Amino acid sequence: MTAIRARAFAANVGFYLVLLAILLFSLFPFYWVLITSLKSDAELTQAVHGLWPDNAGFGAYNQLLVAGNFVVPLANSVIVAVGATAIALVTGVLTAYALVRLVQSARAAVLGFVLAVGFFPVIAMVGPLFFVYRNLALLNTYPALIITYLIYAIPIGLWILVSIFTEIPKEIEEAATTDGATPLQTLWLIVLPLALPGVFTAAIISFILCWNDFVFALSFMSDPNRYTAPLAIVNLGQSRYQVFYNIIDAGVVVTTLPIVILVLFAQRRIVSGLAAGSLKG
């Protein structure tokens, strides 16, 4: 019995050691970005770099936010990501409810089309959209990015919401209909409160996808005052003789931090929403 326990203990220890090694390997690039952002300009020129700066400081962040005015790209990212997420959420809720309750025969075709669009190469969409936006005078505007980001937000939101709405018992809605509620009232007063975990999950994941976009922002925005945060990072820390990686990495940290905080605070809702959509009653 002791030998069996010893083997089980050794197996558990080995498992957690492997898990720790994978975790450290995965987190090290983020750690390196963080410590680089804390280095001074002089320390960047050193031939050997340690695992922690000799004189850690926030000089790069000061240059980024004050001299570089990086708050503007952050605000631009908030505007387009929140705008696209809100539109995608309203569209996704209405479409998902219609597919689940009103036109069930069209569900497979619509979801299949949305899935195909979601897997379509992003770079292949840039050319046609560029000409469309140019003809509509939408280049270098927030609406161009908000409309385009629906390509990210609608597919994932629709799939999550269809899965969530399918799990809600139809009898609850039938009771509301019997009492005289319209389909829209049933959706707003009965279905949405029950589907809140899935709605929050769809909103958070859609926001993250929109926030992290680089390709569309690079293609459609030419005014630095309209740059989103991921696009603005490209132009950080450039000089004639040196690239200031501490400023660039400070921009990466500042851009990533809102997403990290959002996921940490909303992780329970994300997990519960995904789990609710994966369970079949």
Image (cartoon, grey):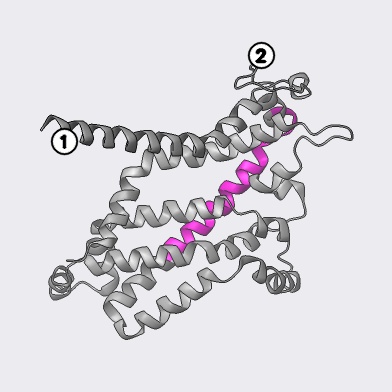
Q: Residue furthest left?
A: 1
Q: Nearer the viewer, residue 212 or 203?
A: 212
Q: The residue tagged with tag 2: helix, strand or loop?
A: loop
Q: Which of the numbered marks, if any, corresponds to residue 138? A: none
- The x and y percentages for residue 124 are 66, 71
Q: Nearer the viewer, residue 99 or 86?
A: 99
Is residue 74 highlighted in magenta?
Answer: yes
> Tag 2: residue type?
Asn
Q: Position of residue 93 (x, y in %)?
A: 37, 66
What secondary structure characterizes most of the magenta part? helix
Q: Secondary structure at mark 1?
A: helix
Image: magenta residue range = 66-90
Residue under label 1: 4
Q: Is residue 117 left or right of residue 174?
A: right
Q: Is residue 188 above or below residue 19?
A: below
Task: Tell me which residue sits at (68%, 68%) in the image.
Answer: 126
- The quarter of the picture where residue 2 lies is top left
